[in-house]
Amino acid sequence: MPFILGKTVSETYAERVRLTPNVIGHRYKPTYPEAGPVGIWKRVTFREFDSECRLVSYGLKAIGLESGDRCVILSNTRFEWTLSDIAILGAGGITVPIYASNTPDDCAYILNHCEAKVAVVEDGKQLEKLLSKRAELKHLKKIIVIEPAGFKAAQGHDEVMGFTALKELGRREESRDPTAFEKTLRGAKPEDLMTICYTSGTTGVPKGVMLTQDNVMSVLEDCERILSPHAQPEAETTVTFLPYSHIIGKLESMAVFVFGWQSCFAENLDLLMTNIAEAKPTLMFAVPRIFEKARTRLEAMVEQSPPAKKALFKWAMEVGRRYQGALWEKRTPSLPDVLQYQVAKKLVFSKIAARFGGRLQFALCGGAPLPKEIGEYFGICNIMILEGYGLTETSAPVALMTPDDVRFGWVGKPLPEVAIKIAEDGEVLVKSRKVFKGYYKNPEATAEVIKDGWFHTGDVGEINADGFLRITDRKKDLIITSAGKNIAPQKIENLAKSQQFINQFVVHGDRRNYLVALVTLDRDAVMQWAKGNQILFSKYEELVRSPKVQALVQKSIDQLNSGLASFETIKKFMILPQEFTVESGEMTPSLKVKRKVINQRYARELDGLYES
């Protein structure tokens, strides 16, 4: 059976169910008895998914969701997320995803702005966010709670009902018109609005990005064209954990119906590596942070190993660099390197591969820049990371690397249907079917970014002679020093994060005479290093102030500076005892740094770094 591509996402889903009903499309571990044995992997065929999805969809219609109505999903990534998403489409509604990490104020803003009539929430924690703002939510009529235990916060709120009760309503509604669900799906038009994804808002109020069926189908069509030589229909397995509120997660959830692969839902990020070992994925959608942390852990393990194992790992990495380096440059590796690499794979790299399930062919990585060193590091270890580039406004990737055309530090070539050009000021411009319909209720903001048919991304980049795109920074993030030097902070920050022990790194220096940085460290790795070096401390805050840790970070920054121009080097730094987080307001839900917030919050510390 080939890959399936309909004229719309809705039709693609309907065709997948019709053509491969008995293929297992999803696996997950139920968290409540009504869904199945708790904590045991449950396999769901496309037919079984469709049967349950119909009940949810008819249930939504029974409680008043009509064609064109907005329905919010406020939940972490889980099986019921995709179920609800397709169910909304089957009822003729428009999905509005909200990050589970969003604050009650953020949730209230989005619900009111899109005038959502219904909200599907994960549990009591998410329900409480909405109930705390209930008086402000004038358009909201019904709240559906996925987890049965979430009802503890629902006393006295008749508008709240459970997922199971919704499906029971749906069962009765379906009996009235059993064909309505599929008719709605197959009746969808390419120009129909499919979802409104609210941007994270690094610089201001979130904007609702309107994406049509055709926007998303255009991405799926191009991905099928470039990935089909490297992925078998209905034969691949993925472990899914990215937020489906993010455009990459949204694309991943829809790609299941095109490619027919088996999507295994991770229980949570803490259990991610355990779930990967159990599910043994062949493909993964990921963000750079997963691999940055994995490398830190591997380096820490090597550091604590006996001298013989350290030497073996160093030898394997040297052999891998020669062997893979030749392939990346499209040269034939020497026979000695081929033979040695096979030995290195057996003795060293197979153990690293086992941590990712042992079957991973490649990982598609986006959401943030992947440091070149991280891509090369795992490439040497025979784990291929393919970086891509796109925005919510472009329905995810407009450029992507492929397994047979790898160049780390770049984000691949434009997808087949996409045109990209670089403006005079370096901004990346995109023309494509993938470019969004506009910002919801905000034509002024839409006009600012779509000019003469070209979408102005706000990113600065370049295209080389081979057609590869590289992103160097956000246009608004560029630092101009007091000496008039233009500096791209993301370039420096990405290089810094490839240094051992460094977790987060934020560069500061706009209108200053030199650059400084705020640094957070990998807490577990540093504490393990301190233990191995007999450094006594009572609190982590005390440890990061110790001269030995300061010297450790200075060594990393010296190494970083050695590869930078003199005006780009970091002259001073401060180690913070806590990470930047979404909850603190210093990061967006998609884990982008809010520079303005950080600059304001740490103004005193930053000013101190400029004192004599």
Image (cartoon, helix red, strand yellow):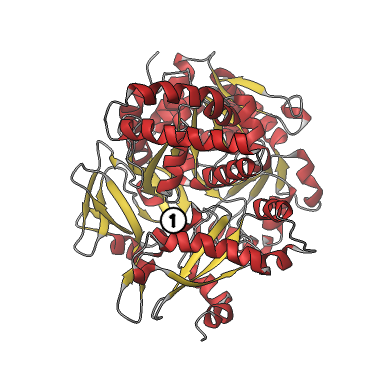
Task: Name the foreground residue: 292 vs 119.
Answer: 292
Task: Name the foreground residue: 441 vs 85.
Answer: 85
Task: Using residue 118 as the reference point, say whether residue 188 is left or right of it.
Answer: left
Task: Using residue 495 as the reference point, say whether residue 402 is left or right of it.
Answer: left
* Residue 400 pos. (x, y %): 34, 39
Vertical comparison of 4 with 580: above or below:
above
Q: Residue at 44% across / 24% down in the picture?
A: 340
Q: Residue at 23% across / 65% down in the picture?
A: 425
Task: Using residue 452 as the reference point, say whether residue 150 is left or right of it.
Answer: right
Quadrant in the picture for the N terminus: top left
Q: Amino acid at mark 1?
A: Leu
* Residue 416 pos. (x, y %): 25, 36
Q: Secondary structure at mark 1?
A: helix
* Residue 537 pos. (x, y %): 77, 63
Can residue 59 be seen here? The reply is no
For mark 1, what is the residue? 495
Query: Please, which residue is most extreme toward the bottom here?
Result: 612
* Residue 121 pos. (x, y %): 65, 46
Vertical comparison of 485 with 560: above or below:
below
Vertical comparison of 607 with 592: above or below:
below
Task: Name the foreground residue: 65 vs 225.
Answer: 225
Q: Residue at 63% across / 28% down in the picture?
A: 277
Label 1 crowd bin: few (<14), some (14–19), many (20+), radius 10 Å: many
Can residue 90 be seen here? The reply is yes
Total label count?
Answer: 1
Q: Residue at 51% across / 86% down in the picture?
A: 612
Q: State the image quarter where residue 561 is shown.
A: bottom left
